[in-house]
Image: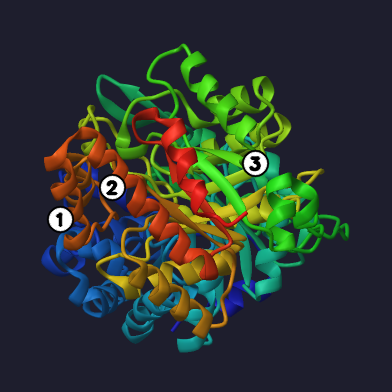
Amino acid sequence: MPDFRELLADGRPHLFDGAMGTMLYAKGVYINRCYDELCISQPELVADVHRAYVKAGAEVLETNTYGANRVKLARHGLEDRTAEINACAARLARKAAGDHVCVAGAMGPLGMRIEPFGPTSQEEARSIFREQATGLAEGGVDLFVLETFVDVEEIHQALLAIQEVSGLPIVAHMTVREDGRTAYGTEASILAERLSAMGVDVVGLNCSVGPSAMLAATDAMLAATDRPLIMQPNAGLPRDVDGRTIYMASPEYMATYTARLIRKGVRFVGGCCGTTPEHIARMAGALRMLAPSQAPRVSVHAPEADGRAVEPVPLAERSQWGRKLAAGEFLTTVEIVPPRGVNPEAMLEGVRLLKEAGVDGVNVPDGPRAQSRMGALATAILIQQRIGLEAVVHYSCRDRNLLGMLSDLLGAQALGLRNMLFVTGDPPKMGPYPDATAVFDIDAIGLTNLAARLNRGLDPGGNVLGDATSFVLGVGVNPGAEDLEHELRRFYWKVEAGAEYAITQPVFDLRQLESFVERIEREGIRIPIIAGIWPLVSARNAEFLANEVPGVVVPPEILDRMRRASDIGKEAGVEEGLRIAQEMLRDALPIIQGVQVSAPFGRVPLALEVFDAIPA
């Protein structure tokens, strides 16, 4: 049996194979099929590709298992066949490889974000990777290849999973953009050092870019690691030609860059998307003409993910809102929705009333119920610059990807916004544009993690920003959630991510709020809780909140009170709604550190009357 460790030790350049998906697609397999499952249903089709790469001169074959983890297989209803598919793929490649070609168990990312930027825990991710690695090991692979990862933490969990089931060598690839950084902004040199520190045997890059971009990253990576380097580029950047995605780099072009990579000191080469056995054959020819160069090694030290983080600005120094939070003082705020159009004057007039009344801040929701309104960031800037009252900005994950959120937060810091409330956001189907596309790249937990890193001077990739941000980090919570255990778990994760206060959904049942506070205190968690209070204005308003606003629970007894009052008249309904809001606030005072009062239909004076329940 071949031993990949011999290739590691001999000091010569060696060749991996090329793309599997490109070849299967060329053989007529549509992209809506599960390519990994073909190892079982059409094994000869996959074996033909393997044999073609062996004939072309590949010394390492990768199994057809890039997406063969439970998460991705579930999209095809195949999650229960994870072990079977991986073991079968390994045996299929082993048979095609013969006695002199190594077989690498290929493992790709899960296709979902893990903590700290996603809801999947590191332990759960590691368990999923472990299941796939076990199947590949049972099928007889000679090494493992982790490929096309963008998140260093995710590839770390995959590495740990492999190490739990096997002592075989591990090759670890990350993928970068044309600028030599991952989607998280991590530089290639830092990737090389971090992967080396994790204990992988070979580090490198694959996919996303062509050979030119990988060559540009080579020197920095070689200087940052003492591990052998591997580069598996695409056959150039994809081009759309008559509706088809075509990779334009010719076999001759790939062979030319193979020679350049080896002369730089790269030990292992191969191909990714767009490469074929013809590309690999030309690359094999280039390798036969070369001897490995002895590239100079310069010792450099990239920062660990948190190695150069700074201490966050003390909470009391970030804003007046933060000062009162830190001091344990009671906070008052009113929620005013942004204007529907471009004229903010009516809204700003309401904010002036709030400032005159002495409230601590104005809450600015971000497209609540997926309504189309002026952006929360722009609205908050207008409020602070023109009225001089601090804003608490609700910031939703619905409309922006991770990079867009990073850009917005950096801009918010520069423009003087400090007080944030991170929410996942309501889906577009709730609003007037149900066909609009939601992003939800990360949720409120991931966004809190992102902002907490920014407060320590680090971007999502762990790169040092220079100056740290100074946000006061808030999150939403719903004490009346139908699945309270799920809500509590998510709340604990938000606190662990860095949340410094929480604002609840409107409270109409004090028992729910008391139970929630009791539960979190029992867990040793006591960040300031700011209760949401909504002064109802009519029975119809109460029924709407109870039936059409997610997360709001209006008990039957409150509905009955509003119906009886509204039967008397409009003003009686408003007075009863105000009375209920004041009762809720007065009874909640012992267990909260603040109140956010909503101004229904922009009625700021009504919202201000709720504060009369606070003792002087």
Mark 1 touching mark 2, by CB under 8 A? no
Mark 2 touching mark 3, by CB under 8 A? no
- Residue at image coords 36%, 58%: 507
On residue 74, the disc is none
- SS at mark 1 in the image: helix
Q: Nearer the viewer, residue 477 or 246?
A: 477
- SS at mark 3 in the image: loop
Amino acid type, residue under disc 3 in the picture:
Gly
Report, in whole angstroms, how far the alpha carbon at label 1 lies from the one at label 3. Answer: 63 Å
Q: Quadrant of residue 126?
A: bottom left
Q: Nearer the viewer, mark 1 or mark 3?
A: 1
- Residue at image coords 14%, 49%: 564
User: Does the rendering let one see residue 47?
Assistant: no
Of the two numbered discs 2 and 3 on the same chain, state the one appearing first in sequence.
Answer: 3
Amino acid type, residue under disc 2 in the picture:
Glu
Write down the residue under mark 1. 560
Label 3 Cα neighbours within 10 Å, binned few <14 / some 14-19 / many ≥20: many
Mark 1 touching mark 3, by CB under 8 A? no
- Residue at image coords 21%, 30%: 435
On residue 576, the disc is 2
Label 1 Cα neighbours within 10 Å, binned few <14 / some 14-19 / many ≥20: few
Write down the residue under mark 3. 180
Q: Is 65 placed above or below 427 here?
A: below
Q: Nearer the viewer, residue 505 or 457?
A: 505
